[in-house]
Image: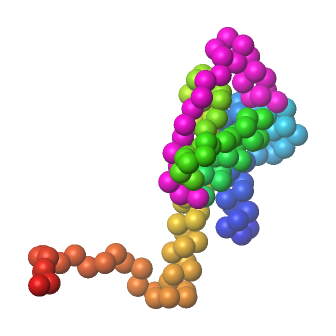
Amino acid sequence: MSDRDKLLDRLRLIEALYEGGATAGERAAAAAARERVQARLRQMEQTAPPIEFRFTLNNAWSRRLFVALLRRYGLRPYRYSRQRHTTVMVRVSRGFVDETLWPEFQALDEALREHLDRQTETIIQEAVDADGSAAEEVADIHVLE
């Protein structure tokens, strides 16, 4: 199984965990689980109206993942003109953010970052230099005059 396939399997497992649904083998149940989450979102919006949230995501991979997750739940990510590209705005209920959206994003983002870190390390060691250690720490800073 390739690293990509392993990552996809891990992401599916995490998604299933947070959707309260299925194991990896129950792919048909995953669609039903997603619908349950969307129904829970609609229910939360009736009891607690959506409010505007601002998220700041400092790397492109996390931002793309977060936007995809929002769209999967039928939410509309946006940003205002003059806002930084690191900003993602969305109108959603606080309960959905706290109970579902943010915990799921954090788990998926961690899995994605771990995968990207492994891939980056492999590429650097194979294509640039096998010594992947950090820069040497020196005792004193010398100021150039």
Q: Give the quadrant of residue 29.
A: top right
User: Relative to the observer, which residue lies in front, 88 or 130?
Assistant: 88
User: Relative to the observer, which residue lies in front, 133 or 145?
Assistant: 145
Position of residue 121 in the picture relative to residue 70 (left or right): left
User: What percent of the width, then of the height, locates residue 6?
Assistant: 69, 61
- Relative to residue 96, is residue 117 depicted above or below? below
Whether residue 54 is in magenta: the answer is yes
Residue 2 seen in this snapshot: yes
- Relative to residue 39, is residue 144 depicted above or below? below
Count of marks overlaid on the render:
0
User: What percent of the width, then of the height, locates residue 66?
Assistant: 64, 46
Numbered range of the magenta stretch: 35-60
Question: Residue sitting at 76 percent across and 41 percent down?
Answer: 72
Whether residue 53 is in magenta: the answer is yes
- Relative to residue 32, is residue 51 depicted above or below? above
- Relative to residue 42, is residue 58 depicted above or below? below
Q: Give the quadrant of residue 79.
A: top right
Give the quarter of the figure containing the N terminus: bottom right
User: What percent of the width, then of the height, locates residue 65?
Assistant: 65, 51
Question: Residue sitting at 73 percent across and 37 percent down?
Answer: 76
Position of residue 64 in the picture relative to residue 72 (left or right): left
Question: Residue sitting at 68 percent across and 41 percent down?
Answer: 77
Outermost residue to the front: 82
Give the quarter of the figure containing the C terminus: bottom left
Residue 96 seen in this snapshot: no
